[in-house]
Amino acid sequence: MNPKPFGTLFASYPAAGMRITWQHTQGLTGVKVGDDYWYTGDIVGLMKTQYPHKEGVWSWGKDMDQVVMVVRNP
């Protein structure tokens, strides 16, 4: 299994269901989902973030190849 599947980032607005999304993704694929809060430049499997980011910084550079935007419809 590829430990860095395509450089995939999960992004969501606060309270949009990110926790259930990453828990199911990690459980179904067996690929660890990392958090941008602890980002050190090493991508661990899939990564997750929230928008707007508290610091307002896009720290990924060219490390991410695709983004999954999680949007909840109230």
Image (cartoon, rainbow, N blue to C red):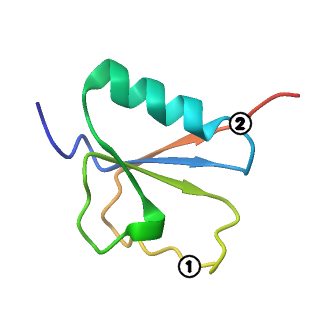
For label 1, the residue is: 57
The image shows residue 39 at horizontal and vertical percentages of: 37, 69
In the rendered image, which quarter contains the C terminus? Answer: top right
Residue 47's disc is: none
Which residue is label 2 attached to? 71
Q: Residue at x 24, y 40 (%)?
A: 5
**Can you give x and y, in whole percent of width and height, for residue 12 in the image?**
64, 47
In depth, the one of 74 and 8 nearer the eye is 74
Q: Secondary structure at mark 1?
A: loop
What residue sits 57% from the left and 38% below the top?
19
The amino acid beneath tag 1 is: Val
Q: Residue at position x 67%, y 60% from top?
A: 51
Q: Is residue 17 left or right of residue 28?
A: right
**Among numbered discs 1 and 2, the one appearing first in the sequence:** 1
Q: How many residues crowd mark 2 within 10 Å: few (<14), some (14–19), many (20+)?
A: some
Q: Is residue 62 above or below residue 45?
A: below
Q: CA distance from mark 1 to mark 2?
A: 21 Å
> Where is residue 70, by image quadrant?
top right
